[in-house]
Amino acid sequence: MLLKLSLWCGLVISSALQCVLLASLVVEQPWLGSNVVWMLVHILLSAIGAVCSGKLLSDEAKETKQYLSFYILLFSFALFIPFAGIAATFVATFYGFREAHRRHRQPDYWKLTPRAELPFTTPKGRVATRVDSRGFTEHLMYSRNDDDLYRKVLAAANIRTALSVTALKQAMRHRDERIRLTAYKTLDRKVTDLNRQIQHLEAQVSAGDNIENSNTWLQIASNYWELLTLEKGEKVARDQLLKKAAQAAIEAVSILPGNRNAHFVLGRVSLMQGNAQRAKIALERCKTLGMPDDKVLPQLAEAAYMQRQYATVRELLNKLDPATRAYPPLSHVAEFWT
């Protein structure tokens, strides 16, 4: 508070003295004796005003990093615009800062673009429309164009299982028989294809420790994970799939300890199994190997929650990028803990 008051005093005093200094040019009264002294005093006052203005403006914009180029710009304004001077420079820049800051209250939602799940969620702060806010799922709930929905259900066969399974299960409850049967057949075909791929990959695994074998086991674990999204409602099937996915991920890690994707899959599977300690170790390892924070930190926060380490949960969520925290369901969790 004392520093801010000092900055305001420096700004006002330097502005007033500069007005007096510039007035001497108008009345042609060389109060300081010579032009050289006048110029030196003008430069000194401009420098003081630029420093005070720059610090006050940075505080207004909540900018912690100080940029030398910004202070040079303010100094140039104060020095080379005699009849604007420090006061006019500060007022104009202050209102520019304040209005720019007010217009950008929300984070930039589309800063993270390589996320395939974004079209299936409504960004925080956006008004949800009745039909389109959640895409395919809401069309199934509200749209009356059955022919259009039928074509969309057919196209869902080409969408990754983890992203399409919710919509397809919703389609299985639709009033139109074509849509119900097509959704059921699509899900059944996805299950059959995944099981066939697992059998084919298991037959490909050869003796020896190499990158190819590690990636094969990782793909097997990923396929079991995909199957889990289809069978998670059945407890026995769920437990079996989690066990097989964990075994495949452990094989991938044991063959190639530097396989960060295998560590990540093992961590997620361990969380669903309730093994928080193993999940934490696997997730911290994949983070060390370079896995992006926006993928790892939410999982680590869940592991910390399972271990009742609530302070760690808050710390991990606060480290996430604001654009990542802005999307549901993570936005609701982050808002609660922060």
Image (spheres, grey):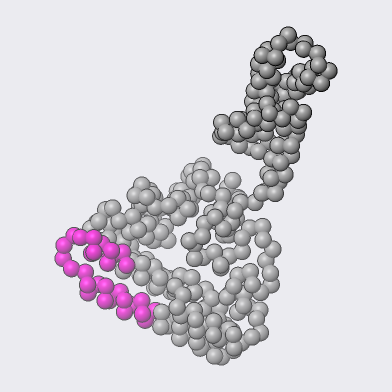
User: Does 179 sit left or right of 85 as displayed?
Assistant: left
With 94 as the anchor, is 169 left or right in this view?
left
Q: Position of residue 76 (x, y in %)?
A: 64, 30
For the point 48% across and 70% down, the residue is 163
Q: Where on the picture, by quarter, is residue 219?
A: bottom left
Most extreme residue toward the left is 207
Quadrant containing the N terminus is top right
In the depicted view, which residue is nearer to us: 67 or 298? 67
Classify 169 as above or below 177: above
Inspect the magenta stretch and tell me whether residue 40 lies in it: no
Residue 72 image position (x, y, % from top left): 60, 30
Name the one closer to the observer, 305 or 127.
127
**Whether residue 90 is visible:** no
Q: Residue furthest right?
A: 27
Q: Identify the image quadrant of residue 174.
A: bottom right
Using the rendered view, name the quadrant where residue 110 is placed.
Answer: bottom right
154 sits left or right of 133 in the view? left
Vertical placement of residue 279 versus 87, above or below: below
Nearer to the camera, 112 or 184: 112
Q: Residue at x 68, y 44 (%)?
A: 101
Q: Is residue 24 above or below residue 295?
A: above
Question: Which span of residues is magenta-colored?
Answer: 191-219
Query: Which residue is at 44% across, 73% downward?
Result: 161
Image x and y of residue 25, in percent: 78, 19
How many numbered discs, if any?
0
